[in-house]
Amino acid sequence: MAQYDLLIVGAGLYGGVFAHALHQQGLRCLVIDKRGHIGGNTYCDRKEGIDVHAYGAHIFHTNDQGIWDFVNSFVPFNRFTNSPLAVHKGKYYNLPFNMNTFYQLWGLSDPQQVKEKIQQQIQQAGITQPRNLEEQAISLVGKDVYEVLIKGYTEKQWGRPCHELPSFIIRRLPVRFTFDNNYFDDRYQGIPEGGYNKLTEGLLAGSVIELNKDYLQNRDYFNGLAKHVLYTGPIDAFYNYQLGTLAYRSLRFEEELLPIDNYQGVAVVNYTEREVPFTRILEHKHFAFGRQPVTIITREYPLSWEKGLEPYYPVNDEVNNALYNKYKALAEQEKNIEFGGRLADYKYYDMHQVIAAAQVHARKFLQKNYQR
C-alpha cells in the first residue's frame, strides 16, 4: 500500500499550493525537493536581520482579491510598492516609463509634448512591420527610450543583440503620461512580513517534507511511495532530454554585506548599459523598510544556461515552444503523474499566476481522483 496519496516533486509555490489544497481534503502528501530548503525561488535567507531574496527579487502583485486574501491568510503582507530606478551612464531614471522618466530624459513636463515627441520618433523610424525586438521597441516608444533604457538591459538579459531577438518578446511597453513611479498597476502589492518562507511554511503545513532528495535519480523508489505524483521540475529532464534540450536563461548572484545602513536608497536599480556586466542591484532591506545598521546587496548577472545551472527564464521562441509541445504530448500519456509549474509548463509565471494555476489544477485533480 502506498504511504501517501500524492508525491509532490518540488517544494516551491506551485507544489505548496497543491499540497495545501489536498491537505484541506484530508489527503496525505509527501513533498520532496533536491535543494536543502523549501520555497523554490521565493526562498529568503535571513542574514543580519534582513530577509535576502536568495534567487532574485520576488514582489507579489495581483488584481485578484481572492488570491490576495489567500496569501494573507498565511502571513500578512506589507505595503511595499515597487518603484525601481534605472542607471545609464551615471544618470538615474524612474521606472516604469512615466512623466518623471521623460523629464529626466528630455526636460519635458507637459504630457502632450511628451506624446508628440514619442510619436515623432516613431514616425521618423518608419517601421511598419517590426522584424525583431529592436524594431518592435522603437515602433512603440521611439529611439531615445529604446537606446537609453531598453537596449543594453535586454541584450544582457538574453545574451544576444536586440536586432537578433524576436519581436514578440516585447509585445507592448508600459508608458504612462503621469508622474507615477509604481511599477505595477495591480490593486494589491506587497512582500510577506518576515519573508516568503512564512508563506511556504503555511502552505506546506500538514505535509511530510524531505529535502536534498533528487527525484530523477531515484524515481522508481519515490513513485512507489504514493498513489499519484505531481512533478514540477523541467519537463525535458523528466524524459532525460530524449527529444532535445529546452533552452533557458540563467542567473548568477553576487551577494555583499556592507557596513553601512543604506547603499542605494531603493530596493531595485537596473543598469541599462551593455558594458556593465550585471543587470541590476537589489538592496534587500528596502523590501521591508529595514532599519538595520548594515545592508546586503545582490548583483544579478545573466548567464547562458547549460545543464547543471538553474533554469530561470524559458526561451519561448518558435523552436523551443514546438519542442515543449512534443514533451507535453508525452506527459499527457502518463498515468498517475501530473505536471505543473514554471519548469514543467515551460512558461514564465508571476507568483499570483502560479497560485491560480495550481489552484485550478488541484481542483481538477481532486474531482477526477477523489470526488466520484
Image (cartoon, rainbow, N blue to C red):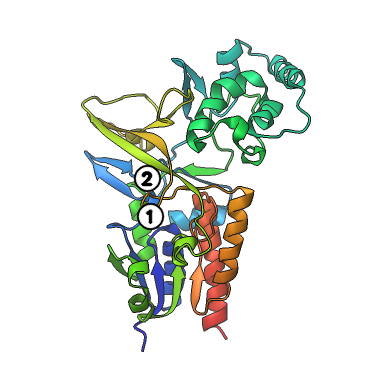
Q: Residue at x 57, y 80 (%)?
A: 368
Horizontally, residue 266 falls left or right of residue 170, namely: left
Where residue 226 sits in the image (x, y, percent)?
39, 80
Q: Residue at x 59, y 31 (%)?
A: 162
Where residue 186 sits in the image (x, y, percent)?
57, 42
Horizontally, residue 274 falls left or right of residue 42, namely: right
Q: Are marks 1 and 2 in contact (CB under 8 Å)?
A: yes
Q: Counting other residues with Cα less than 10 Å from the Cα at mark 2, is it few (<14), some (14-19), or many (20 or more)?
A: some
Query: For the residue labelled by badge 1, is the local secondary structure a helix, a strand or a loop?
Result: helix
Q: Is residue 99 above or below residue 335?
A: above
On the image, numbered disc 2 is attached to which residue? 55
Q: Is residue 158 above or below residue 239?
A: above
Is 268 or 62 nearer to us in this picture?
Answer: 268
Residue 261 seen by the camera: yes
Q: Is residue 295 above or below residue 168?
A: above
Q: Quadrant of the C terminus?
A: bottom right
Q: Residue at x 56, y 30 (%)?
A: 161
Query: For the residue labelled by badge 2, is the local secondary structure a helix, a strand or a loop?
Result: loop
Is 244 or 296 nearer to us in this picture?
Answer: 244
Give residue 166's mark.
none
On the image, numbered disc 1 is attached to which residue? 40
Q: Is residue 250 above or below residue 323?
A: above
Horizontally, residue 123 falls left or right of residue 356, namely: right
Where residue 202 sits in the image (x, y, percent)?
36, 61
Q: Residue at x 55, y 14 (%)?
A: 104
Amino acid found under the numbered disc labelled 2? Tyr
Amino acid found under the numbered disc labelled 1? Gly
